[in-house]
Image (cartoon, grey):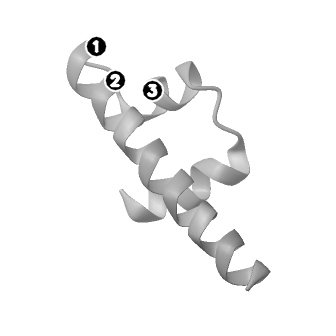
Amino acid sequence: MCKAVEELAEKWAEESGLDDIRNLMESMQWTVEQAMDALRISEEDRAILLKRF
């Protein structure tokens, strides 16, 4: 069960992160890179998020 909870938390974080990135891109007219910089998303997480973009 612990693994399932971890996977669910990761999925939620990715989706939440995507929403935050999209909101910044739309409201500020930023690129995806600028939005990720503003949110201080790590390089490792960027690679994961960009796959879902």
Classify residue 27 as left or right of residue 36. left
Residue at 48 percent across and 43 percent down: it is 17
Give the class, few, some or many, for how many residues have Cα within 10 Å of label 1's Cα (few <14, many ≥20).
few
Whether label 3 touches label 2, CB < 8 Å: yes
Tell me the quadrant of the picture where the C terminus can be found.
Answer: bottom left
- Residue ID for mark 3: 35
Mark 2: secondary structure? helix
Q: Estimate the x, y position of residue 6 in percent, counting from the top left.
A: 71, 70
Residue farthest toward the top in the current orientation of the protein: 28
Q: Is residue 34 above or below residue 49?
A: above
Marks 3 and 2 sit apart, C-alpha to C-alpha, by 6 Å
Number of numbered discs: 3
Whether label 1 touches label 2, CB < 8 Å: yes
Mark 3: secondary structure? helix
Amino acid under disc 1: Met
Residue at 56 percent across and 25 percent down: it is 39
Q: In the rendering, which numbered label is found on residue 24?
A: 2
Amino acid under disc 2: Leu
Q: Estimate the x, y position of residue 48 in percent, counting from the top left.
A: 57, 60
Residue at 59 percent across and 48 percent down: it is 46
Marks 1 and 2 sit apart, C-alpha to C-alpha, by 5 Å
Whether label 1 touches label 3, CB < 8 Å: yes
Q: Estimate the x, y position of residue 52 in percent, counting from the top left.
A: 41, 63
Q: In the rendering, which numbered label is found on residue 28?
A: 1
Residue farthest toward the front in the current orientation of the protein: 1
Q: Considering only order in the chain, which callout, 2 or 3, is on the residue closer to the N terminus?
A: 2
Classify residue 16 as left or right of residue 6. left
Tell me the quadrant of the picture where the N terminus can be found.
Answer: bottom right
